[in-house]
């Protein structure tokens, strides 16, 4: 997003004369959120499928000024949602120039800034921080230390001649350095218990403790954490006092409708840089495939199936079309149904299977992909008259297809087919009939659907398949 110019005030005096009003982080977020609600503006851009479920709960929590923990399986957009919260901060906020923890000129809290404020008065220098700089994030790992999050003694400052006990010898951790901002702890239960204890004061008393220093810093911060529900229970790895200090616990979920799944894939998959077209009916196959994998009893439901599964599938399928284009000279590259089976092998590592399915992972995914293809075929071409295609095969033709079979070769194999334009319209491919790639994508999808509904046969051959009667 375009940044507006940095505000003009450069001293405390100029800041006061500008009429600037000091607000806490939670007050900023509350007032800006309410203003967007009143104006009907987007509050959490890029978030799909949470409008009627997660977002109302989150909005209530932010208005109430609560620290929040988001519970959900992997790939449900928890981190993405947390990052959008920083967009509710004021675009620019004043800080005391050179302050490590972003003290507000009206309310300095660290020793250095209090001393400067006393010495300089209204000439206290002011700098400005954009809201993009007021977001901090830490992926919780077992090796995370208190020093990483909260702070520790800086040995370099001690070596320079300062004495132990001097508050200015403290090296602040990530949390204090995000003072007056939003801080996220991803996968909170993975923090060791002693590190979780260090967060207690931050959440309740809003201060920090570092190695026995007589140091009280009233941090102004919104803390948002994410966790897997399996870990965030009495059997999990989070201490009860820390759970109690979060004001709101909100469950996230995977897209509830096929429309949301489709929107998410189109929004997140990086197809533009690949330069290949992924027709809408294939996006739908991938969306249905993802949903079937999530619902499968062969898959461990506790680990979930990430939205990245569908995104990676879309990108890999498009990449297959680009590879075919490079090898055969076909242009432009258009993804076809033959590009999807090869994706199954690369996706296997994104899914946790039940122990009983060990050794059958690829077979399970291939079966679910066929189901997704059949469902999409019935949804779009179930009522179409495909008799002209079937009649061509009754004449004894055999059509070969595969990842490296060019569109022109596929079209020559099947010959002229009546009703091709209607077929492409039903698949949402518009007027793309002039492109052999689009025509081949539509016809091959019809052939695969006819095979899955047992109106054609298909043989596996080296490098591809052969459709026949």
Image: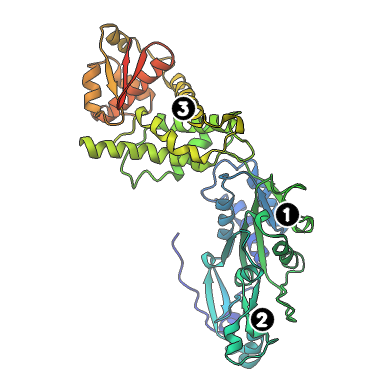
Q: Tell me the distance, in whole angstroms, between the alpha carbons under discs 3 and 1.
A: 38 Å
Position in image of residue 172 (x %, y %) = 62, 75
Q: Which of marks 3 and 2 is nearer the N terminus?
A: 2
Residue placed most toward the observer, 241 or 53:
241
Q: Which mark is residue 238?
A: 1
Asked if residue 332 can be seen in this view, the reply is: no
Position in image of residue 302 (x %, y %) = 64, 39
Instruction: Report the quarter where the C terminus lies.
Output: top left
User: Seen in the image, is 282 located left or right of residue 468?
Assistant: right
Q: In which quarter of the image is residue 195?
A: bottom right
Name the residue rendered at 31%, 25% in the picture: 464
In the rendered image, which residue does mark 3 sit on?
366
Q: Residue 110 carries which label?
A: 2
Q: Tell me the distance, in whole angstroms, between the alpha carbons under discs 3 and 2.
A: 60 Å
Q: Nearer the viewer, mark 2 or mark 1?
A: 1
Residue placed most toward the observer, 441 or 49:
441
Instruction: Answer above or below: position of 387 versus 105.
Output: above
Secondary structure of the residue carrying numbered label 3: helix
Residue placed most toward the observer, 264 or 455:
455
Q: Earlier in the sequence, mark 3 or mark 1?
A: 1
Name the residue rendered at 45%, 71% in the picture: 5
Instruction: Answer above or below: position of 126 versus 42.
Output: below
Secondary structure of the residue carrying numbered label 2: loop
């Amino acid at each position: 997003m375009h940044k507006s110019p940095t505000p003009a005030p450069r001293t405390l005096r100029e800041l006061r004369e500008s009429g600037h009003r000091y607000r806490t982080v939670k007050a900023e977020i509350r007032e800006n959120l309410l203003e967007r609600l009143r104006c009907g503006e987007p509050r959490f851009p890029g978030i799909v499928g949470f409008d009627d479920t997660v977002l109302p709960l989150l909005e209530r929590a932010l208005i109430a000024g609560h620290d929040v923990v988001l519970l959900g399986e992997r790939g449900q957009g928890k981190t993405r949602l947390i990052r959008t919260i920083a967009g509710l901060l004021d675009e620019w906020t004043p800080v005391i120039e050179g302050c490590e923890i972003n003290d507000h000129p009206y309310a300095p809290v660290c020793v250095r800034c209090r001393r400067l404020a006393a010495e300089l008065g209204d000439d206290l220098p002011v700098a400005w921080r954009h809201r993009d700089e007021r977001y901090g994030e830490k992926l919780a790992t077992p090796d995370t230390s208190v020093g990483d999050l909260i702070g520790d003694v800086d040995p370099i400052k001690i070596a320079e001649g300062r004495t132990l006990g001097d508050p200015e010898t403290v090296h602040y951790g990530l949390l204090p350095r995000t003072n007056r901002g939003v801080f996220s702890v991803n996968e909170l239960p993975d923090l060791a218990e002693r590190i979780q204890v260090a967060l207690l004061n931050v959440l309740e008393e809003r201060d920090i403790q570092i190695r026995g220093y007589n140091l009280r810093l009233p941090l102004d911060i919104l803390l948002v954490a994410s966790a897997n529900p399996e870990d965030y229970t009495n059997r999990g790895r989070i201490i009860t006092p820390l759970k109690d200090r979060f004001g709101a616990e909100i469950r996230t979920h995977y897209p509830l409708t096929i429309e949301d799944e489709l929107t998410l894939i189109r929004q997140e998959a990086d197809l533009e840089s690949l330069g290949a077209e992924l027709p809408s009916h294939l996006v739908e196959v991938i969306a249905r495939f993802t949903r079937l994998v999530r619902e499968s009893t062969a898959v461990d439901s506790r680990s979930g199936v990430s939205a990245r599964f569908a995104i990676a599938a879309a990108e890999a399928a498009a990449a297959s079309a680009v590879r075919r284009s490079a090898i055969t000279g076909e242009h432009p590259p258009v993804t076809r149904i033959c590009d999807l089976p090869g994706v199954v092998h690369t996706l296997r590592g994104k899914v946790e299977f039940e122990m009983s399915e060990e050794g059958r992972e690829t077979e399970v995914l291939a079966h679910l992909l066929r189901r997704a293809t059949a469902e999409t075929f019935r949804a779009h071409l179930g009522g179409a008259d495909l008799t002209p295609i079937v009649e061509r095969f009754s004449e004894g033709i055999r059509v070969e297809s595969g990842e490296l079979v060019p569109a022109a070769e596929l079209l020559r194999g099947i010959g002229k087919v009546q009703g091709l334009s209607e077929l492409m319209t039903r698949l949402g491919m518009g007027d793309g009939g002039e492109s052999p790639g689009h025509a081949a994508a539509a016809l091959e999808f019809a052939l695969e659907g006819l095979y899955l509904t047992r109106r054609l046969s298909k043989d596996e051959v080296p490098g591809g398949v052969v459709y026949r009667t």
